[in-house]
Amino acid sequence: MRMRTVEIGVGAFMLAGILALVVLALNVSGLNLSEQAGGYKVYARFDNIGGLTPRAKVAMSGVQIGQVTAIRIDKDMLMAEVEMEIFNDVDYLTVDSSASILTAGLLGEQYIGVVPGAEEDLLGDGDFIQDTQSALVLEELIGKFLFNKVSE
Amino acid sequence: MLDILQRLGHKALSRLAAIGRAGQILLQSLVAAPQPLTMLPLILKQIYFVGVLSLVIIIVSGGFIGMVLGLQGYTILVDYGSEQAVGQMVALSLVRELAPVVAALLFAGRAGSALTAEIGLMKATEQLASLEMIGVDPLRRIVAPRLWAGFICMPILAIIFAVVGIWGGALVAVDWLGIYEGSFWANMQQSVDFYDDVLNGIIKAVCFGVVVTWIAVFEGYDCIPTSEGISQATTRTVVYSSLAVLGLDFILTALMFGEL
């Protein structure tokens, strides 16, 4: 009888541990096993990416439609080339879509905002987004402001 | 002058010998041919003592630590108008650091000291010697189940600590301070990564579990078999394992999050 309470206790303990791990996985870290559907690659060149990092989100109207997978320098054009993975079910980005690097909130992380255009042709795997807008760099902004003040 | 040198050498040698004995105990009790059938009930019983009975202290302290984190985080972050980030702060600090470390410290105080005292008393009353006399290996019968139980319990306790702490933080931040529930959880889910944060925290907890149980069992097995010796061994268990946990935590953090 004594052994039985011990075993029940241990069983409940193990169960509590497993449940807690599941809560950590699903509720706290937002691990999503089903959404590994993959996507297609789209590229964009920026003059300055600011603080953009891989795994930053790509959003349209604030809704996430993909994420940044790689950032490198394009040696020929001497610009930053950002590789994005767009979810497969997002099949309405036109070739004249524009991409800009935005900041979530005042101190938030940077992400890429995509605005679709009006053309009929759609972006496919490996295409480039032509219309891009770089990140706002605070120092440059202040520099411009000071320059304007001086020239007045 | 030579006396001082000799004392230093003696101390160093005895320390080294102790480390060697500790390694020997660990190796002999773990590597010794496993007998799952006789071992399993013993391990279950030890898990009950070491894990299930530690649950109360783990849950209570986890809840309070989470609540304090929520409160402190709110008062700081509200100055910057980003009080939604409380969820992220509570979850990251709990999962990465506080849950493994504080659970290990509590574990050392609650379970480690009991292990040391129990084994030490067995040694003092010559139960270990009589086990050996009737042909039962005390390392396998007494030490190994306790080691395994510690290894198994510590990560589970740390996970439970983290979850209860996050709930405590949510209780304070959402229900009391009125942060919007959706942004609290969404911020948390966006910043906490399962592999980088949760799994690394669990790896930490496993390491701490090994270290704390190892120290506790060794100090008990190696103590001077008198009542004074047992009390010293118990003190040493708590002191050494707390120091080891904190030191090891820095090393592990540097390895995991320091981008070395």
Image: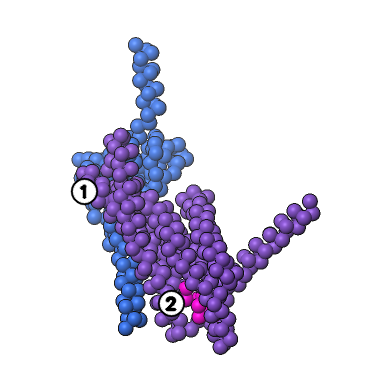
Chain colours: A blue, B purple
Give the labeled residue for mark 2.
B43
**Residue at the (56%, 88%) spot, across then down:** B134
Give the labeled residue for mark 1.
B175
Q: Which three-letter amino acid code belongs to the residue tagged 1?
A: Asp
Front residue (pair B70, A125): B70
> What span is in magenta?
B138-146
* Chain under callout 2: B
Is B16 on the left or on the right of B5, as rendered? left
Examine the image and state in which quarter residue A38 appears: bottom left
Q: Residue furthest right?
A: B2
Q: Which three-letter amino acid code belongs to the residue tagged 2?
A: Ile
Rendered location of residue B14, percent (x, y): 67, 64
Mark toward the start of the polypeptide (2 vs 1): 2
Residue B32 visible, this orientation: no
Q: Is residue B135 above or below residue A14?
A: below
**Residue at the (41%, 39%) spot, across then down:** A80
* Chain under callout 1: B
Is B24 on the left or on the right of B152, as rendered? right
Q: What is the total number of numbered labels drawn onto the structure image? A: 2
**Residue at the (24%, 40%) spot, across then down:** A115
